[in-house]
């Protein structure tokens, strides 16, 4: 969901350096380094660096001086480069070269799964650049209206103090975002207006769905509360936080419902346009158009018939469907469970309660009622199959008559070729998009097949019963193994020993969980839960398999009916497809890849020995060590620039004093604790690197697959002769080719399960 945020605040001069350091991830804020994507600055000639400018401002300007802080959100839907362009456009128009500023872009994972929180922090000095050459000391002096060259730069409170300036900023940022959305054909809009105002406009435009989405309280909370640790919150702050979370959740649900409604509407419109286009091309006056429509229908009737026949023979799917029919709440609860499983973190307690409700519903349904409903479902399926068989016979009869009526003469061959050339581009694009859908469906199906393996089902069952604890432990074990197996692990013997000890503890915890479900009631509970999970994935597998077979049948139909055309003409259409679809998608993927590689580099910087040491010591001394290091580094830099003997002597004395303080601080620390803390940081960042590397490989794989798809050759077989030879038997043969052959064994129960099924009534 596109989002809008732009707020402007005043910052006091004395806090400018701290704010700049926070934005840049410097000093005691170095833990934020991995969030920093990019920064750019406009500073005067006399400033050695952006840090130097803001330090001078803090020291030289008046005590009551203030600067402007702007925070604005960037858009997940746009690439990093596009977001940067927007930001530059905003700065150029509203700040320009008239004022000095620092812009820092942050990128971190948001509270919503899979959504990045990309935003920018802008610091602006309100002193107006008037072209007069000034050094740092003069620049921050009081402005002299009679002789500007004698005084400091003017503090432009007239511009920055107006409420209209903020209004203009907000409206301009809204317009820029919407302009880039339009440019990228993104059918979304953001607004700088209040919720109330937006709702009024929506009602005025009769957009009742949008008005309903906007009918909610605004999501507001004091920023300082979010930064505090939960245990440090006051009772009043806890109430505010709870209200904030509730309103945020309410907002997300409203936006989700609205986005689904919009998506549904867009899909309906696209489907309508596509159908109109297909109708125009294939259902025209041409005899061939009618034949191809009948042929496609015959292909799809056969696959639909096969799907229904498989469903008719699947007792478990029928049983679940019958339960959903008998008690309508069953399906609603299943949906709620699915939604809860997508939440981060997963609320296992809520899932457990809902699963208990499902079990309770099943137990209340009598065997007689269940068998009766299954019988009704079977009869309905048989009736549907009979209707499809009748439809199949009618299509076969019509096709035989229509095809036999076409004479294989030069005139008809020309008519056929003309019709095919006219439809070739549209058919080609449909084929390529269908092939792409097949690729994604095959990936999903393979994933579901892997989930149905006994080892994976056992994992899901243990994880469900332990409310997620089993999975957390396994993830920790995997992380440690990856670190130990990494060729570039660069770990000390202390860290290796510590990790091996962790492995022993974690494996013991796993064994404790598993042992609870090896006998008695625990074993009974395990098998019931595993059985339920297994059936859920069987349903999922069946749906995906059916969808894949439909897609493959569609490809088969297209390949058999798309006419072979000259190679140069085919290259032209392939280029059109690449330009329209693949290349655009690859640009977005490459932008994502760049961001991931930057993130990886930032994380790798954190596992250098010096970084780990600084973070660990800083953690153990509550930030005191970091402050000492910063003071020490500042004095070292200052020492190199000072020439005055007395000042230099004072600096050296301060350096020696800090060194003594540092040694005393270190001597008070426990070495074992230090090694443990350092090891914990090492594991944390190594684990994060592995995750980023996995994401990088996934993105690279998608780019490669797109490039392969772009160049993939298709063996088209369409001709008037092949049309004349078309028979129902040919359809049956093609059906045999596309039917999925990697079926799973849905009855692959182990000894436990077979024994338990004898003892438990699984039909209820």
Image (spheres, rainbow, N blue to C red):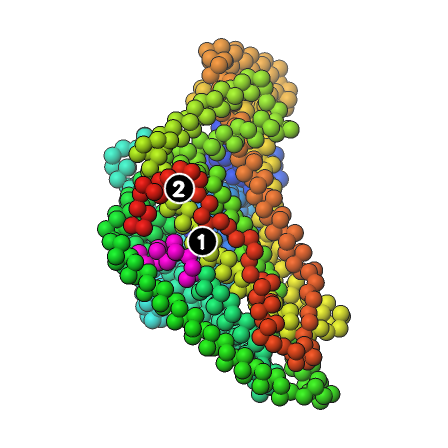
> Is residue 314 covered in magenta?
yes
Horizontal relation, residue 275 to residue 430: left or right: left
Which label is found at residue 142?
A: none
Are there few (<14), some (14-19), or many (20+) residues within 10 Å of tag 1? some
Q: Which span of residues is magenta-colored?
A: 311-323
Of the 4 image quadrants, the one containing the N terminus is bottom left
Q: Kindly identify the residue that appears in the image at 42 percent across and 68 percent down.
A: 265
Between 672 and 152, the residue placed more toward the observer is 672
Horizontal relation, residue 270 to residue 715: left or right: left
Where is residue 234 shown, x and y percent of the image?
27, 33
Between 139 and 209, the residue placed more toward the observer is 209
What residue did someone put label 1 on? 540
Instruction: Measure the alpha-carbon separation of dots 1 and 2.
Output: 23 Å
> Is residue 653 covered in magenta?
no
Residue 202 at least partly seen: no
Where is residue 297 shown, x and y percent of the image?
52, 75
Which label is found at residue 754?
A: 2
């Amino acid at each position: 969901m596109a989002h809008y945020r732009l707020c402007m605040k005043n910052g006091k001069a004395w806090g400018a350096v701290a704010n700049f350091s926070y934005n840049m991830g410097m000093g005691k804020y170095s833990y934020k380094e991995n969030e920093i994507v990019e920064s750019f600055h406009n500073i005067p000639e006399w400033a050695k660096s952006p840090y130097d400018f803001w330090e001078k401002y803090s020291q030289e300007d008046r005590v009551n001086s203030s600067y402007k802080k702007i925070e604005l959100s960037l858009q997940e839907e746009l690439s990093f480069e596009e977001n940067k362009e927007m930001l530059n456009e905003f700065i150029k128009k509203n700040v320009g070269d008239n004022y000095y500023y620092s812009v820092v872009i942050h990128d971190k994972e948001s509270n919503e799964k899979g959504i990045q929180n990309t935003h920018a922090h802008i610091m602006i000095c309100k002193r107006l650049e008037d072209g007069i050459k000034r050094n740092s000391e003069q620049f921050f002096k009081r402005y002299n209206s009679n002789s500007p060259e004698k005084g400091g730069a003017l503090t432009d409170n007239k511009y920055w103090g107006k409420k209209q300036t903020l209004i203009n900023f907000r409206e301009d940022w809204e317009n820029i975002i919407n302009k880039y959305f339009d440019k990228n054909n993104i059918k979304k809009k953001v607004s700088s207006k209040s919720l109330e105002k937006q709702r009024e406009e929506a009602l005025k435009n009769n957009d009742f769905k949008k008005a309903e989405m906007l009918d909610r309280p605004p999501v507001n909370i004091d920023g300082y509360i979010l930064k505090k640790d939960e245990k440090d919150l006051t009772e009043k702050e806890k109430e505010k936080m709870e209200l904030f979370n509730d309103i945020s959740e309410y907002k997300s649900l409203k936006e989700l419902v609205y986005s689904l409604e919009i998506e549904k509407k867009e899909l309906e419109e696209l489907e309508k346009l596509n159908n109109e286009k297909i109708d125009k091309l294939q259902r025209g006056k041409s005899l061939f158009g009618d034949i191809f429509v009948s042929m496609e229908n015959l292909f799809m009737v056969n696959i639909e018939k096969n799907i229904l026949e498989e469903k008719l023979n699947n007792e478990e799917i029928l049983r679940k469907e019958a339960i959903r029919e008998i008690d309508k709440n069953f399906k609603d609860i299943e949906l709620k469970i699915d939604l809860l499983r997508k939440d981060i973190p997963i609320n296992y307690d809520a899932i457990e309660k809902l699963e208990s409700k499902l079990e309770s519903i099943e137990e209340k349904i009598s065997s007689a009622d269940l068998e009766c409903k299954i019988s009704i479902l079977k009869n309905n399926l048989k009736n549907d199959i009979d209707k499809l068989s009748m439809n199949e016979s009618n299509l076969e009869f019509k096709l035989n008559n229509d095809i036999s009526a076409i004479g294989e003469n030069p005139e008809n061959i020309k008519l056929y070729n003309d019709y095919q050339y006219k439809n070739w581009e549209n058919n080609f694009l449909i084929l390529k998009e269908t092939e792409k859908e097949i690729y994604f469906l095959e990936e999903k199906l393979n994933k579901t097949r892997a989930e149905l393996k006994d080892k994976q089902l056992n994992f899901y069952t243990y994880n469900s019963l332990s409310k997620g604890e089993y999975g957390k432990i396994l993830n920790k074990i995997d992380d440690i193994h990856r670190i130990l197996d990494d060729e570039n692990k660069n770990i000390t013997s202390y860290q290796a020993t510590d990790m091996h000890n962790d492995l022993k503890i974690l494996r013991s915890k796993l064994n404790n969980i598993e042992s609870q479900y090896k006998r008695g009631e625990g074993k009974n509970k395990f098998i019931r839960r595993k059985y339920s999970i297994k059936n859920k994935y069987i349903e999922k597998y069946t749906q995906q398999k059916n969808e894949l077979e439909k897609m493959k049948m569609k490809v088969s139909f297209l390949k058999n009916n798309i006419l072979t055309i000259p190679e140069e003409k085919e290259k032209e259409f392939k280029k059109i497809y690449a330009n329209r679809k693949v290349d655009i998608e690859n640009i977005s993927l490459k932008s994502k890849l760049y961001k991931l590689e930057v993130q990886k580099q930032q994380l790798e910087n954190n596992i250098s020995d010096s970084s780990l040491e600084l973070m660990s010591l800083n953690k153990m001394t509550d930030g005191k060590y970091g402050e000492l290091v910063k003071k020490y580094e500042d004095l070292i830099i200052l020492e190199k620039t000072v020439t005055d003997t007395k000042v230099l002597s004072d600096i050296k004395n301060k350096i020696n004093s800090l060194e003594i303080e540092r040694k005393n601080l270190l001597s008070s620390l426990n070495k074992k604790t230090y090694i443990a803390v350092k090891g914990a940081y090492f594991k944390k960042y190594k684990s994060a690197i592995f995750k980023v590397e996995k994401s990088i490989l996934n993105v690279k794989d998608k780019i490669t697959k797109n490039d392969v798809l772009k160049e993939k050759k298709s063996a088209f077989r369409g001709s008037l002769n092949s049309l004349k030879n078309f028979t129902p038997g040919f359809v049956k043969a093609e059906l045999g080719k596309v039917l999925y052959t990697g079926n799973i064994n849905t009855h692959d129960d182990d000894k436990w399960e077979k024994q338990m099924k004898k003892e438990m009534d699984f039909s209820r």
